[in-house]
Amino acid sequence: MKRILFVTRTNPIRVTAGNQQRTDQSIKALVSLGYKVQVMMLVGPNASKDKLQKAFLRKYPQCKLRLVQQRSGRDLVALGKWRAGLRQYLLETLDRLTLRTWMITNEHECPRALRVAIDKELRSGRYAAYFSNYLKVTPLNGVRFAGPKLCDTHDVQSERIWNNLRRDEPSALMRRLKYQVHRWSERRCLRNFDALLAISSQDVERLASIGGAACPELVCAPASFPDPGVDIHTHKDADIGFVGTSSRPNVDGLLWFMSEVLPVVLERHPDLRFRIIGKSGLDPAVVDAAAAFTGNIELKGLVDDLAAEYPKVKIWIAPMRFGTGMKIKVVEALSMKAAIVGTSLAFTGIDVADGTSAMVADDAMEFADKIGRLLDHEALRARMSAAAFDVFKAGHSFEAYRDTLSRVLSQA
Protein backbone atom coordinates (compact mmCIF):
# COMPACT_ATOMS: atom_id res chain seq x y z
CA MET A 1 0.00 0.00 0.00
CA LYS A 2 1.36 3.43 -0.94
CA ARG A 3 1.98 5.93 1.82
CA ILE A 4 1.24 9.64 1.56
CA LEU A 5 2.22 12.41 3.96
CA PHE A 6 -0.68 14.84 4.42
CA VAL A 7 0.33 18.08 6.18
CA THR A 8 -2.29 20.44 7.58
CA ARG A 9 -3.04 22.96 10.31
CA THR A 10 -6.80 22.44 9.90
CA ASN A 11 -8.50 20.12 12.37
CA PRO A 12 -11.24 18.23 10.46
CA ILE A 13 -12.58 16.16 13.37
CA ARG A 14 -15.67 18.31 13.81
CA VAL A 15 -16.59 20.03 10.55
CA THR A 16 -18.06 23.49 11.13
CA ALA A 17 -16.28 25.50 8.42
CA GLY A 18 -15.45 25.18 4.73
CA ASN A 19 -11.73 24.57 5.20
CA GLN A 20 -12.51 21.70 7.59
CA GLN A 21 -14.96 20.20 5.09
CA ARG A 22 -12.37 20.31 2.29
CA THR A 23 -9.71 18.76 4.55
CA ASP A 24 -12.10 16.00 5.61
CA GLN A 25 -12.97 15.21 1.99
CA SER A 26 -9.30 15.11 0.97
CA ILE A 27 -8.36 12.63 3.70
CA LYS A 28 -11.34 10.38 2.93
CA ALA A 29 -10.63 10.51 -0.81
CA LEU A 30 -6.99 9.50 -0.32
CA VAL A 31 -8.04 6.60 1.91
CA SER A 32 -10.61 5.44 -0.65
CA LEU A 33 -7.87 5.47 -3.31
CA GLY A 34 -5.90 2.94 -1.28
CA TYR A 35 -3.30 5.25 0.27
CA LYS A 36 -2.04 4.76 3.78
CA VAL A 37 -2.37 8.33 5.00
CA GLN A 38 0.00 9.79 7.57
CA VAL A 39 -1.55 13.06 8.71
CA MET A 40 0.78 15.64 10.24
CA MET A 41 -1.26 18.35 11.97
CA LEU A 42 -0.01 21.59 13.50
CA VAL A 43 -1.96 22.34 16.69
CA GLY A 44 -1.95 25.16 19.22
CA PRO A 45 0.12 25.22 22.42
CA ASN A 46 -2.86 24.37 24.63
CA ALA A 47 -4.22 21.49 22.56
CA SER A 48 -4.80 18.18 24.33
CA LYS A 49 -2.76 15.80 22.19
CA ASP A 50 -4.18 12.59 23.70
CA LYS A 51 -7.76 13.79 23.24
CA LEU A 52 -7.10 14.83 19.64
CA GLN A 53 -5.40 11.53 18.83
CA LYS A 54 -8.34 9.48 20.10
CA ALA A 55 -10.98 11.63 18.37
CA PHE A 56 -9.05 11.62 15.08
CA LEU A 57 -8.53 7.86 15.02
CA ARG A 58 -12.20 7.27 15.80
CA LYS A 59 -13.14 9.28 12.71
CA TYR A 60 -10.29 8.11 10.45
CA PRO A 61 -9.32 4.62 11.70
CA GLN A 62 -7.32 3.86 8.54
CA CYS A 63 -5.00 6.85 9.08
CA LYS A 64 -2.14 7.69 11.38
CA LEU A 65 -1.79 11.07 13.08
CA ARG A 66 1.29 12.93 14.20
CA LEU A 67 0.67 16.17 16.10
CA VAL A 68 3.20 19.00 16.03
CA GLN A 69 2.57 21.46 18.83
CA GLN A 70 3.07 25.13 18.05
CA ARG A 71 5.07 26.73 20.88
CA SER A 72 6.57 30.20 21.13
CA GLY A 73 10.17 30.76 22.15
CA ARG A 74 8.97 31.77 25.62
CA ASP A 75 6.94 28.53 25.95
CA LEU A 76 9.96 26.41 25.02
CA VAL A 77 12.21 28.20 27.53
CA ALA A 78 9.58 27.62 30.25
CA LEU A 79 9.74 23.89 29.41
CA GLY A 80 13.51 23.93 29.89
CA LYS A 81 14.34 23.75 26.17
CA TRP A 82 16.72 26.72 26.22
CA ARG A 83 18.44 26.23 22.89
CA ALA A 84 15.24 25.56 20.95
CA GLY A 85 13.48 28.40 22.79
CA LEU A 86 16.20 30.93 21.92
CA ARG A 87 16.20 29.83 18.28
CA GLN A 88 12.41 30.11 18.09
CA TYR A 89 12.44 33.51 19.80
CA LEU A 90 14.97 34.85 17.25
CA LEU A 91 12.88 33.54 14.34
CA GLU A 92 9.71 35.13 15.75
CA THR A 93 11.53 38.42 16.34
CA LEU A 94 12.81 38.42 12.76
CA ASP A 95 9.25 38.01 11.52
CA ARG A 96 8.01 40.85 13.72
CA LEU A 97 10.76 43.28 12.75
CA THR A 98 10.42 42.68 9.01
CA LEU A 99 7.56 42.17 6.58
CA ARG A 100 7.99 38.39 6.80
CA THR A 101 4.71 38.20 8.74
CA TRP A 102 2.98 39.15 5.49
CA MET A 103 4.40 36.21 3.58
CA ILE A 104 1.95 33.42 2.84
CA THR A 105 4.11 31.11 4.95
CA ASN A 106 5.94 32.43 8.01
CA GLU A 107 7.00 31.45 11.50
CA HIS A 108 3.41 31.44 12.71
CA GLU A 109 1.86 29.48 9.84
CA CYS A 110 4.75 27.06 9.36
CA PRO A 111 7.03 27.17 12.44
CA ARG A 112 10.43 25.56 12.59
CA ALA A 113 9.12 22.55 14.50
CA LEU A 114 6.76 21.73 11.62
CA ARG A 115 9.45 22.25 8.98
CA VAL A 116 11.84 19.91 10.81
CA ALA A 117 9.12 17.28 11.27
CA ILE A 118 8.17 17.37 7.56
CA ASP A 119 11.81 17.06 6.50
CA LYS A 120 12.42 14.13 8.86
CA GLU A 121 9.34 12.23 7.63
CA LEU A 122 10.16 12.72 3.96
CA ARG A 123 13.80 11.71 4.45
CA SER A 124 12.62 8.36 5.84
CA GLY A 125 11.85 7.13 2.33
CA ARG A 126 8.49 5.69 3.41
CA TYR A 127 6.31 7.96 1.28
CA ALA A 128 5.13 7.76 -2.31
CA ALA A 129 3.66 11.30 -2.32
CA TYR A 130 3.48 14.53 -0.34
CA PHE A 131 0.21 16.48 0.06
CA SER A 132 0.23 20.00 1.49
CA ASN A 133 -3.17 21.19 2.69
CA TYR A 134 -2.79 24.97 2.04
CA LEU A 135 0.31 26.72 0.74
CA LYS A 136 0.90 28.30 4.15
CA VAL A 137 2.01 25.02 5.77
CA THR A 138 4.73 24.66 3.17
CA PRO A 139 8.31 25.85 3.83
CA LEU A 140 9.08 28.84 1.63
CA ASN A 141 11.97 26.97 -0.02
CA GLY A 142 9.89 23.84 -0.54
CA VAL A 143 10.67 20.31 0.63
CA ARG A 144 13.38 17.86 -0.36
CA PHE A 145 11.37 15.02 -1.82
CA ALA A 146 11.72 13.16 -5.10
CA GLY A 147 8.12 11.93 -5.32
CA PRO A 148 4.97 13.78 -6.40
CA LYS A 149 4.32 16.98 -4.45
CA LEU A 150 0.68 18.08 -4.44
CA CYS A 151 -0.93 21.12 -2.81
CA ASP A 152 -4.57 21.99 -2.29
CA THR A 153 -4.55 25.81 -2.44
CA HIS A 154 -8.17 26.09 -1.14
CA ASP A 155 -8.36 29.63 -2.57
CA VAL A 156 -6.18 32.52 -3.74
CA GLN A 157 -4.66 33.74 -0.50
CA SER A 158 -3.32 37.03 -1.91
CA GLU A 159 -6.87 38.07 -2.78
CA ARG A 160 -7.98 37.44 0.79
CA ILE A 161 -5.03 39.44 2.11
CA TRP A 162 -5.77 42.34 -0.26
CA ASN A 163 -9.41 42.46 0.87
CA ASN A 164 -8.28 42.58 4.51
CA LEU A 165 -5.64 45.24 3.86
CA ARG A 166 -8.12 47.51 2.10
CA ARG A 167 -10.22 47.52 5.26
CA ASP A 168 -7.52 47.50 7.93
CA GLU A 169 -4.39 49.26 6.61
CA PRO A 170 -4.84 53.05 6.39
CA SER A 171 -1.50 53.71 4.66
CA ALA A 172 -1.68 53.20 0.89
CA LEU A 173 2.10 52.69 0.74
CA MET A 174 2.15 50.00 3.44
CA ARG A 175 -0.95 48.39 1.98
CA ARG A 176 0.76 48.00 -1.39
CA LEU A 177 4.07 46.90 0.14
CA LYS A 178 2.51 44.22 2.36
CA TYR A 179 0.44 42.95 -0.54
CA GLN A 180 3.47 42.69 -2.84
CA VAL A 181 5.41 40.75 -0.20
CA HIS A 182 2.51 38.32 0.17
CA ARG A 183 2.05 37.90 -3.58
CA TRP A 184 5.79 37.30 -4.10
CA SER A 185 5.81 34.60 -1.42
CA GLU A 186 2.65 33.03 -2.89
CA ARG A 187 4.32 32.82 -6.30
CA ARG A 188 7.42 31.25 -4.79
CA CYS A 189 5.39 28.66 -2.86
CA LEU A 190 3.29 27.74 -5.88
CA ARG A 191 6.43 26.77 -7.79
CA ASN A 192 7.48 24.24 -5.14
CA PHE A 193 4.89 21.68 -6.30
CA ASP A 194 4.30 19.32 -9.19
CA ALA A 195 0.55 19.91 -9.22
CA LEU A 196 -1.87 22.34 -7.58
CA LEU A 197 -5.54 21.90 -6.81
CA ALA A 198 -7.75 24.97 -7.26
CA ILE A 199 -11.32 25.01 -6.03
CA SER A 200 -12.78 26.73 -9.12
CA SER A 201 -11.95 27.55 -12.74
CA GLN A 202 -11.67 31.21 -11.73
CA ASP A 203 -9.00 30.31 -9.17
CA VAL A 204 -7.13 28.31 -11.82
CA GLU A 205 -6.83 31.46 -13.92
CA ARG A 206 -5.82 33.66 -10.98
CA LEU A 207 -3.19 31.24 -9.70
CA ALA A 208 -1.79 30.79 -13.20
CA SER A 209 -1.31 34.56 -13.46
CA ILE A 210 0.45 34.63 -10.07
CA GLY A 211 2.66 31.61 -10.78
CA GLY A 212 3.70 32.80 -14.22
CA ALA A 213 5.59 30.68 -16.72
CA ALA A 214 7.10 28.46 -14.01
CA CYS A 215 3.73 27.63 -12.45
CA PRO A 216 3.12 23.86 -12.21
CA GLU A 217 0.00 22.09 -13.44
CA LEU A 218 -3.21 23.62 -12.08
CA VAL A 219 -6.22 21.35 -11.72
CA CYS A 220 -9.77 22.47 -11.00
CA ALA A 221 -11.10 20.38 -8.12
CA PRO A 222 -14.41 21.89 -6.95
CA ALA A 223 -15.71 21.53 -3.40
CA SER A 224 -17.34 18.15 -2.87
CA PHE A 225 -19.77 16.37 -0.57
CA PRO A 226 -21.06 12.81 -0.30
CA ASP A 227 -24.65 12.27 -1.39
CA PRO A 228 -26.60 12.71 1.88
CA GLY A 229 -29.83 11.19 0.55
CA VAL A 230 -31.99 14.03 1.84
CA ASP A 231 -35.79 13.86 1.59
CA ILE A 232 -37.07 17.30 0.55
CA HIS A 233 -40.60 16.45 1.71
CA THR A 234 -39.72 16.86 5.39
CA HIS A 235 -42.04 19.19 7.31
CA LYS A 236 -40.83 22.80 7.03
CA ASP A 237 -40.75 24.71 10.29
CA ALA A 238 -38.87 27.78 9.02
CA ASP A 239 -39.20 29.92 5.89
CA ILE A 240 -35.64 31.20 5.41
CA GLY A 241 -32.37 29.78 6.65
CA PHE A 242 -28.75 30.90 6.82
CA VAL A 243 -25.75 28.87 7.93
CA GLY A 244 -22.20 30.12 8.31
CA THR A 245 -19.21 30.80 10.50
CA SER A 246 -18.44 34.13 12.13
CA SER A 247 -16.09 35.12 9.30
CA ARG A 248 -16.24 38.69 8.04
CA PRO A 249 -17.95 37.86 4.72
CA ASN A 250 -20.64 35.84 6.49
CA VAL A 251 -21.38 38.45 9.16
CA ASP A 252 -21.32 41.32 6.65
CA GLY A 253 -23.69 39.53 4.29
CA LEU A 254 -26.02 38.58 7.09
CA LEU A 255 -26.18 42.14 8.44
CA TRP A 256 -26.83 43.49 4.92
CA PHE A 257 -29.67 41.00 4.48
CA MET A 258 -31.23 41.89 7.83
CA SER A 259 -31.06 45.64 7.22
CA GLU A 260 -31.84 45.89 3.50
CA VAL A 261 -33.72 42.75 2.43
CA LEU A 262 -35.57 41.26 5.39
CA PRO A 263 -37.78 44.32 6.09
CA VAL A 264 -39.00 44.24 2.48
CA VAL A 265 -39.79 40.51 2.67
CA LEU A 266 -41.65 41.00 5.96
CA GLU A 267 -43.99 43.53 4.37
CA ARG A 268 -45.48 40.67 2.31
CA HIS A 269 -44.87 37.86 4.81
CA PRO A 270 -45.15 39.35 8.33
CA ASP A 271 -45.19 35.93 10.03
CA LEU A 272 -42.00 34.77 8.31
CA ARG A 273 -39.58 32.63 10.35
CA PHE A 274 -35.86 33.21 9.74
CA ARG A 275 -33.43 30.67 11.23
CA ILE A 276 -29.71 31.47 11.59
CA ILE A 277 -27.40 28.52 12.25
CA GLY A 278 -23.69 28.55 13.07
CA LYS A 279 -21.29 30.93 14.77
CA SER A 280 -22.45 33.83 12.61
CA GLY A 281 -25.59 33.97 14.75
CA LEU A 282 -23.45 34.42 17.86
CA ASP A 283 -21.72 37.54 16.56
CA PRO A 284 -22.66 40.53 18.77
CA ALA A 285 -23.59 42.71 15.78
CA VAL A 286 -25.92 39.99 14.47
CA VAL A 287 -27.48 39.47 17.90
CA ASP A 288 -28.14 43.21 18.18
CA ALA A 289 -29.67 43.39 14.70
CA ALA A 290 -31.86 40.34 15.39
CA ALA A 291 -33.35 42.06 18.44
CA ALA A 292 -35.32 44.32 16.08
CA PHE A 293 -37.12 41.27 14.63
CA THR A 294 -38.48 39.61 17.75
CA GLY A 295 -40.68 36.69 16.77
CA ASN A 296 -39.25 36.42 13.26
CA ILE A 297 -35.60 35.43 13.88
CA GLU A 298 -34.27 32.33 15.62
CA LEU A 299 -30.54 32.21 16.50
CA LYS A 300 -29.67 28.53 16.83
CA GLY A 301 -25.88 28.73 16.98
CA LEU A 302 -24.02 25.45 16.46
CA VAL A 303 -26.09 22.30 15.92
CA ASP A 304 -25.14 18.66 16.30
CA ASP A 305 -26.51 17.55 12.93
CA LEU A 306 -26.58 20.21 10.22
CA ALA A 307 -27.85 17.73 7.63
CA ALA A 308 -31.06 17.38 9.62
CA GLU A 309 -31.63 21.14 9.48
CA TYR A 310 -31.60 21.67 5.71
CA PRO A 311 -34.88 19.87 4.88
CA LYS A 312 -36.75 21.83 7.59
CA VAL A 313 -36.29 25.21 5.85
CA LYS A 314 -38.03 26.33 2.67
CA ILE A 315 -35.35 28.69 1.32
CA TRP A 316 -31.65 29.09 2.11
CA ILE A 317 -29.84 32.37 1.53
CA ALA A 318 -26.21 33.20 0.66
CA PRO A 319 -25.95 37.02 0.78
CA MET A 320 -22.13 37.33 0.72
CA ARG A 321 -20.81 40.57 -0.77
CA PHE A 322 -17.05 39.92 -0.60
CA GLY A 323 -14.69 37.01 -0.05
CA THR A 324 -12.56 34.61 -2.06
CA GLY A 325 -12.86 31.06 -3.32
CA MET A 326 -15.82 28.79 -3.78
CA LYS A 327 -18.42 29.05 -1.02
CA ILE A 328 -18.46 25.50 0.33
CA LYS A 329 -21.66 26.06 2.33
CA VAL A 330 -23.43 26.83 -0.97
CA VAL A 331 -22.22 23.51 -2.40
CA GLU A 332 -23.45 21.78 0.74
CA ALA A 333 -26.86 23.40 0.28
CA LEU A 334 -26.96 22.10 -3.30
CA SER A 335 -26.21 18.60 -2.04
CA MET A 336 -29.10 18.98 0.40
CA LYS A 337 -31.53 19.79 -2.44
CA ALA A 338 -32.01 23.33 -1.15
CA ALA A 339 -33.73 26.18 -2.95
CA ILE A 340 -31.11 28.93 -2.67
CA VAL A 341 -31.17 32.70 -3.15
CA GLY A 342 -27.71 34.25 -3.21
CA THR A 343 -25.51 36.95 -4.63
CA SER A 344 -23.48 36.31 -7.76
CA LEU A 345 -20.35 36.22 -5.57
CA ALA A 346 -21.85 33.40 -3.49
CA PHE A 347 -22.08 31.23 -6.60
CA THR A 348 -18.50 31.87 -7.80
CA GLY A 349 -17.28 28.79 -9.65
CA ILE A 350 -20.61 26.98 -9.22
CA ASP A 351 -22.51 26.23 -12.42
CA VAL A 352 -26.01 27.32 -11.40
CA ALA A 353 -28.56 28.89 -13.76
CA ASP A 354 -30.47 31.85 -12.39
CA GLY A 355 -34.16 31.02 -12.06
CA THR A 356 -33.61 27.30 -12.65
CA SER A 357 -31.17 25.78 -10.17
CA ALA A 358 -30.85 28.87 -7.94
CA MET A 359 -31.93 32.49 -7.66
CA VAL A 360 -29.16 35.07 -8.16
CA ALA A 361 -29.56 38.67 -7.00
CA ASP A 362 -27.11 41.41 -6.00
CA ASP A 363 -29.67 44.18 -5.47
CA ALA A 364 -31.62 44.22 -2.19
CA MET A 365 -35.01 44.69 -3.83
CA GLU A 366 -34.36 41.92 -6.36
CA PHE A 367 -33.12 39.64 -3.57
CA ALA A 368 -36.35 40.26 -1.62
CA ASP A 369 -38.49 39.75 -4.73
CA LYS A 370 -36.91 36.38 -5.52
CA ILE A 371 -37.37 35.19 -1.95
CA GLY A 372 -41.01 36.23 -2.17
CA ARG A 373 -41.51 34.31 -5.41
CA LEU A 374 -40.14 31.14 -3.87
CA LEU A 375 -42.20 31.54 -0.71
CA ASP A 376 -45.37 31.98 -2.75
CA HIS A 377 -44.82 29.09 -5.17
CA GLU A 378 -44.17 25.68 -3.68
CA ALA A 379 -43.94 24.03 -7.10
CA LEU A 380 -41.17 26.45 -8.12
CA ARG A 381 -39.26 25.61 -4.94
CA ALA A 382 -39.57 21.90 -5.65
CA ARG A 383 -38.29 22.29 -9.23
CA MET A 384 -35.38 24.42 -8.04
CA SER A 385 -34.49 21.90 -5.33
CA ALA A 386 -34.28 19.12 -7.91
CA ALA A 387 -32.23 21.27 -10.30
CA ALA A 388 -29.86 22.27 -7.48
CA PHE A 389 -29.20 18.61 -6.74
CA ASP A 390 -28.47 18.00 -10.43
CA VAL A 391 -25.79 20.71 -10.29
CA PHE A 392 -24.28 19.02 -7.25
CA LYS A 393 -24.22 15.56 -8.85
CA ALA A 394 -22.70 16.91 -12.06
CA GLY A 395 -19.68 18.63 -10.52
CA HIS A 396 -19.44 18.38 -6.74
CA SER A 397 -19.87 14.76 -5.73
CA PHE A 398 -17.31 13.00 -3.56
CA GLU A 399 -16.68 10.55 -6.40
CA ALA A 400 -15.76 13.39 -8.77
CA TYR A 401 -13.24 14.82 -6.30
CA ARG A 402 -11.74 11.39 -5.58
CA ASP A 403 -11.30 10.71 -9.31
CA THR A 404 -9.59 14.09 -9.76
CA LEU A 405 -7.14 13.30 -6.96
CA SER A 406 -6.46 9.88 -8.46
CA ARG A 407 -5.67 11.35 -11.88
CA VAL A 408 -3.45 14.11 -10.53
CA LEU A 409 -1.42 11.80 -8.30
CA SER A 410 -0.95 9.19 -11.02
CA GLN A 411 0.16 11.79 -13.57
CA ALA A 412 2.47 13.53 -11.13
Image (spheres, helix red, strand yellow):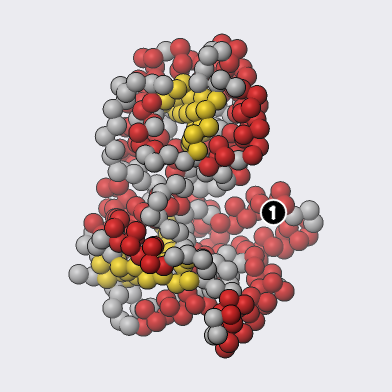
- As helix, strand or loop, the secondary structure at mark 1 comes to helix
- Pick the front one: 39 or 125: 39
Give the left or right position of residue 341, taking residue 124 as reference: right
Residue at left 58%, top 16%?
266
Q: Is 1 placed above or below 381 here?
A: below
Q: Amino acid at mark 1?
A: Leu
> Percent x, y for residue 212?
53, 63
Residue 372 visible: yes
Q: Quadrant of residue 104?
A: bottom right
- The relative height of residue 230 versus residue 12 in the rendered view (above or below) is above
The residue located at (38%, 67%) in the rendering is 50
Which residue is depicted at the point 38% across and 55% down? 13
Query: Is the residue 247 above or below the residue 261 in the image?
Result: below
Instruction: Quickly name the residue at label 1.
Output: 165
Please give the count of numbered marks on the rendered protein.
1
x and y percent of residue 167 in the render?
A: 71, 48
Residue 283, image x and y in percent?
A: 60, 40
Closer-to-camera residue (282/201): 282
Q: Quadrant of the C terminus?
A: bottom left
- Graded by Cα atoms within 10 Å as few (under 14), some (14 to 19) or many (20 or more), the crowding at tag 1 reads some
Q: Residue furthest bottom?
A: 83
Give me the residue at 56% from left, 33% from top.
319
- Residue 215 visible somewhere in the drawing: no
The N terminus lies in quadrant: bottom left
Q: Which of the pair 99/298 is nearer the observer?
A: 298
* Residue 197 image point, x, y percent: 41, 57
In this rendering, the answer to whether 344 lies above or below 108 is: above
